[in-house]
Amino acid sequence: MRPLLAAMMLTCLSATPRTACARWKPRQQAQGAVNAGHLKNASRLHNTRYVRLRFPVNAWGTRRMVDLIQQCAKEVKKRHKGAHKLVVGDLSRRRGGPLPPHAGHQNGREADIGFYMRSGKALAGLWKVGAYHIDARRTLTLVNCLVSSGEVLGLFLQRALQAPLVREAKRRKWKASRISRMFSYPRGRNVRRGLMQHRGGHNNHIHVRLRCAKHERNCRNRPVARRHALRAKRRRKRPKRRRRARHRGVRRSRYR
Ligand SMILES: [Zn+2]
């Protein structure tokens, strides 16, 4: 997107009549929160020389998300010869909304991306891997590319799998403060510091979350608190008092 955007901005700056520029506006895409939102005017991520999609039907996101994944996968291939394609899992549905089994992935600002493997061959899917199997050099280049865009709000990856990336960052002589800002490792699992944090279940992919764009006025960076979401859901499901009294003797099913 960037060369295109830059070209458009340059055209706008140099164009004499202002009307043409006034008409061009970035479009609102992400609406609401990642766990309670939807997507408008979605952009689609495609299979390319750099990216292989796991579920093309769920490969819709905001323009920034789609471009960022393509650009960073391209960057890795450029810097490390022989890098395999980046395996990408779910982004969002075309119009966003709930995407089970994820709690998030609802408004095109989240994506699940795979690792570069030491074997030099891409996995067929987002499979569980051990720290030893990750190609830390290529994967760190990818992560660094994502983060240096300034668009990333957070990354989730299990603590043990952050270790090879931290080792690689030290090998590249990153400053301690930079490593500390980037990774929650070696802090504990519950520590919510660093851009990349531990979350259970993230042992087969890196979960990327982007911040809302300035022009996306109906977008919120903070997810909706789970207890509020649950409370609202329960309130909707609760039967009226009279009906509940009538069925008091009936045992409730666990699977309502
Ligand atoms: Zn995810």
Image (spheres, rainbow, N blue to C red):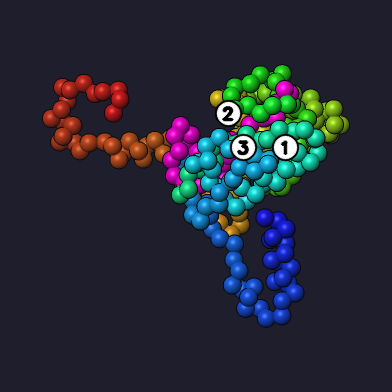
What numbered label is drawn on residue 203?
none
Contact between marks 1 and 3 (CB within 8 A): the answer is no
As for residue 197 lying within the magenta part, the answer is no
In the rendering, at what x and y percent does residue 170 appear? 83, 28
Residue 227, position in %: x, y?
43, 35
Left or right of 99? Residue 155 is: right
Amino acid marked by disc 3: Arg
Q: Residue at x 36, y 40 (%)?
A: 232
Q: Which mark is residue 142?
A: 1
> Which span of residues is magenta-colored?
96-119
Closer to us: 8 or 36: 8
Q: Secondary structure at mark 2?
A: loop
Look at 24% across and 23% down and name the residue there. 252
| Residue pictured at 26% horizontal, 23% vertical | 253
- Residue 251 placement: quadrant: top left
Residue drawn at x 70%, y 66% is 9
For badge 1, the amino acid type reads Leu
Report the residue that reaches farthest toward the bottom. Answer: 17
Q: Tell me where residue 249 sits by quadrant.
A: top left
Could you tell me the amino acid type at mark 2?
A: Gly
Q: Position of residue 66 (x, y in %)?
A: 61, 47
Which x, y percent locates residue 103?
47, 35
Q: Can I make out residue 180 in this image?
A: no
Labels 1, 3: front one:
3
Q: Earlier in the sequence, mark 3 or mark 2?
A: 3
Q: Which residue is mark 2?
A: 125
Residue at which label 3 appears? 52
Q: How many labels, in total?
A: 3
Q: Regarding mark 1 in the picture, which secondary structure is present there?
A: helix
Indicate the quadrant containing the N terminus: top left, top right, bottom left or bottom right: bottom right
Q: Secondary structure at mark 3?
A: strand
User: Is residue 45 among what the camera can see?
Assistant: yes
